[in-house]
Image (spheres, rainbow, N blue to C red):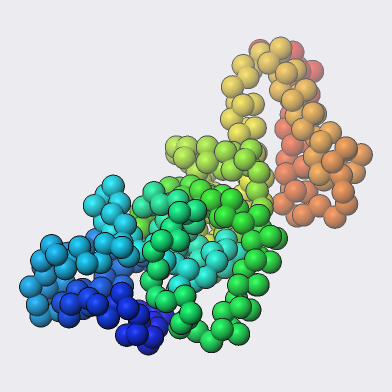
Amino acid sequence: MKRFTSTDKWRDPWFRRLCPTSKLLWLWIVDHCDNAGVVDLDVEAAAFDIGEVVEEHHLAELASRLERLKSGKYFIPKFISFQFGALSAKCVPHLRVLELLSLHGIQYPKRDDSSTTLVPTDSPSLPSTFKEKDKEKDKEEDKDRGGVGEAAEVVKLRGLVSKWFHRRETTQWGDKELKSLAKIETSDEDTALLDAYYSAEIPSGDYRRKDVLTLLNNWQGEVDRARRWKREGQLCKAAPTLSGLRQQKEAIEELLSKHPANKNGVAYRGNPTEEQRKDYLRLKAERDAALREIAGGGK
């Protein structure tokens, strides 16, 4: 893994005053933390890699640059701003950082984290012109996407999709999956519908997507399929009596009146998809079958 570093850290008074072992321990921590700046400090491993005995006073020297989490792990407050700048849900590499922050239970950014710094503020690792451009770009992206609040929705949706496909929270997503996820626009109702659909036991006729990327690239189509699945489940509950058949016919006619493929319907917008046309024809066939049974007197 490659990360940014600052050669000016050797002129930082704080770093210069550290003893040699504490300097090596600090570099070890920065290299071994995850992309959110969190490290599960293994003192024995650190001592082995450094080649020196690591004692409690060495860690105490680094206290002003570290924050102890409830989990016992250590967090470097300024790591994210140094490595990534302002986080944005629209930036694919940032999604993993946002997910890790959520998993660690870290609220970021913090209002009171100005007392700690990773490197001197006047010695950035990147040329200042590049850094200023990145900052302006991130500000625009945050404005367009609603800032960190939008990121929370993306992380929540990612957690749901991971649950549907039995993925562990620590499983990393591919770049294509993250890009497709960031493009999804969905409502709470549609998300809840898909959650019920993908969490249900379907013994036969299971047409649910088998991989994450296919689902993400066909999101709206899968929402339509989940809606049909729910509707069919409700219709199957109606008893095959004359009264039940009439209720079924009325329910289907209501669906037909609002169907996007019905030219005379309230939801018609023109150019329905092939899948919508097939669904409309299937509903009409179900309605006609119900009418025939009603004409025959039902059971």
Quadrant containing the C terminus is top right
Query: Is the residue 255 above or below the residue 111 in the image?
Result: above
From the top left corner, tell me how far across and down residue 250 is, in percent: 78, 22
Query: Is the residue 21 above or below the residue 190 in the image?
Result: below
Residue at 7% x, 73% y is 53
From the top left corner, tell me how far across and down residue 7 is, in percent: 37, 87
Query: Is the residue 194 above or below the residue 108 in the image?
Result: above
From the top left corner, tell me how far across and down residue 91 is, in percent: 57, 68
Query: Is the residue 261 above or below the residue 30 in the image?
Result: above
Q: Which image quadrant for residue 268?
A: top right
Residue at 42% x, 76% y is 120
Residue at 41% x, 52% y is 106
Is 102 situated left or right of 290 in this image? left
Is 27 situated left or right of 259 in this image? left
Quadrant containing the N terminus is bottom left
Q: Residue furthest right?
A: 264
**Residue 169 seen in render:** yes
Q: Which residue lies furthest to the left in this view?
A: 53
Residue at 50% x, 43% y is 198
Is 234 situated left or right of 111 in this image? right
**Residue 165 seen in render:** no
Q: Which image quadrant for residue 86?
A: bottom right
